[in-house]
């Protein structure tokens, strides 16, 4: 089997589990940056991050072996991944153009109007950031490791006057119990490990992306008060799983007063004997309209085998966040991150009715007395990115290999 060329930091191999801390750093190049300056700024930053992983901290040159080993220990397992947004390919933003290659299909900016996607509005407090020339995704085993990596990038940029500006940064964490803010298991069903590579690996068009992948980053605010106003049965129907066990729902029964009683599939509870997040449990095909309308069934309606294009499979790797907590309550949510072989697939999931195109999160569409639609999530920030495969000296380096003559000709 040929080894894959995906960058480190997509934890898709059997037994791999994403580390619990996440930080995404967004970088833009000023308009007149030369392609070679942009390329060397990225290369230099990635080299510095590699040195950091060895325990070599720039401001602590001269540390003895023991101190260096301790620093290396702190950064052990910290991964960094480089991604490029639609802005990098936009010649209105860059003169001279930074890259000579055309923008990959579906790598577009998110709609800036009221709604980024048909059922996903921008939140009131949204700053609508999330898109940039370059995104660096840092994941690691401590808050210190990802946060220090981010600040070391800033220091390097300042000291060496690297061509980029840091324009935004987002943090996130995951829970040890495998649940999210809704208190349901999340990531229970996340494509069987043997099928993940097929779902995430990009094809050879454009050639420089062959063997890479595409990332969707959507930072959602979750309205926890609205969620907690629902009773457990209502919540289970909206998610499509039993709350305590994580078992997928297969139908409903009616109680004495006609109330809906969700029925879950028999079998092992989520996480039994397997690490949360590494588990895989395909939800069964269901016929009850209420269960069919749940988030789980909408996001994967089992219409095709997971590897078929019409299955629109995406590999999720979300991280929760808590931004503020004051008298107005918590401002919290999910950094939804997904990897997929093409962004058209994600677009379809978020646009098609009966998928996530006609409802905010889950439930029956408006007009159903049985289950009034819930406005649970709104977008705070987000962006789409391509993640070129590993390559020397760094992923995507060939994009910036343009002579001054070529750059002038492209203007
Ligand atoms: C704040 C936003 C969101 C929250 C809190 C959330 C939460 C959940 C939960 C609790 C599950 C069930 C547990 C599991 O099977 O892993 C789930 C499953 C899933 N969600 Fe979401 N989700 C969110 C947004 C989205 C969006 C925007 C998409 C699509 C672009 C999506 C796609 C999926 C998929 C594909 C599954 C698994 C379905 C399957 O079993 O194949 N989610 N999500």
Image (cartoon, rainbow, N blue to C red):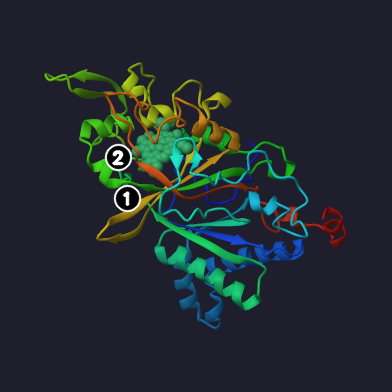
Q: Are marks 1 and 2 in contact (CB under 8 Å)?
A: no
Mark 1 is surrounded, within 10 Å at the Cα level, by few (under 14), some (14 to 19) or many (20 or more) other residues, namely: few
Residue, x 69% and y 57% (percent of image)?
A: 93
Q: Residue furthest top?
A: 287
Label 1 or label 2, whichever comes before in sequence order: 1
Splitting the image into four quadrants, where does ligand 1 fall? top left
**Nearer the observer, 203 or 272:** 203
- Residue assigned mark 1: 176
Q: Which residue is mark 2?
A: 184
Regarding mark 1 in the picture, which secondary structure is present there? loop
Rendered image: mark on residue 225 = none
Residue 95 locus on image (x, y percent): 76, 60
Q: Quadrant of residue 233?
A: top left
- Say whether residue 277 is visible: no
- Horizontal and vertical percent position of residue 330: 29, 55
Q: Is residue 154 shown above or below 132? A: below
- The residue located at (29%, 37%) in the rendering is 272
């Amino acid at each position: 089997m040929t080894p894959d060329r995906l960058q480190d930091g997509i934890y898709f191999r059997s037994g791999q589990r994403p580390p619990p801390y996440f930080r995404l750093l967004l970088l833009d190049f000023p308009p007149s940056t030369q392609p070679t300056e942009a390329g060397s700024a990225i290369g230099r930053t990635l080299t510095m991050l590699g040195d950091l992983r060895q325990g070599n901290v720039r401001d602590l040159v001269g540390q003895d072996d023991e101190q260096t080993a301790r620093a290396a220990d702190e950064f052990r397992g910290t991964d960094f991944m480089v991604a490029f947004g639609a802005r990098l390919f936009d010649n209105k933003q860059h003169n001279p153009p930074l890259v000579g290659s055309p923008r990959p299909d579906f790598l577009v900016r998110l709609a800036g109007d009221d709604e980024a996607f048909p059922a996903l509005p921008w939140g009131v407090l949204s700053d609508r950031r999330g898109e940039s020339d370059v995104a660096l995704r840092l994941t690691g085993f401590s808050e210190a490791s990802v946060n220090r990596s981010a600040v070391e990038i800033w220091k390097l940029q300042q000291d060496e006057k690297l061509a980029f500006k840091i324009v935004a940064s987002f943090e996130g964490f995951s829970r040890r119990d495998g649940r999210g803010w809704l208190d349901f298991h999340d990531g229970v069903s996340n494509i069987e490990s043997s099928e993940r590579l097929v779902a995430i690996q990009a094809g050879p068009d454009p050639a420089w992306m062959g063997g890479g992948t595409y990332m969707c980053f959507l930072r959602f605010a979750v309205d926890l008060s609205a969620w907690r106003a629902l009773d457990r049965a209502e919540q289970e129907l909206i998610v499509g799983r039993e709350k305590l066990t994580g078992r997928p729902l297969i139908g409903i029964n009616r109680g004495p007063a006609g109330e809906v009683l969700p029925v879950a599939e028999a079998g092992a509870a989520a996480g039994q004997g397997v690490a949360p997040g590494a588990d895989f449990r395909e939800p069964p095909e269901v016929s009850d309209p209420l269960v069919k309308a749940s988030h789980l069934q909408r996001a994967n309606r089992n219409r095709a085998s997971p590897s078929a294009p019409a299955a629109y499979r995406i590999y999720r790797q979300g991280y929760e966040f808590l931004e503020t907590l004051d008298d107005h309550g918590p401002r919290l949510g999910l950094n939804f991150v997904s990897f997929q072989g093409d962004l058209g697939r994600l677009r379809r999931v978020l646009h098609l009715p009966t998928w996530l195109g006609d409802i905010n999160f889950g439930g029956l569409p408006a007009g159903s007395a049985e289950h009034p639609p819930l406005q649970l999530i709104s977008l705070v920030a987000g962006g789409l990115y391509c993640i070129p495969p590993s390559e020397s000296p760094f992923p995507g380096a060939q994009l910036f290999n343009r002579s001054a003559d070529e750059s002038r000709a492209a203007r």
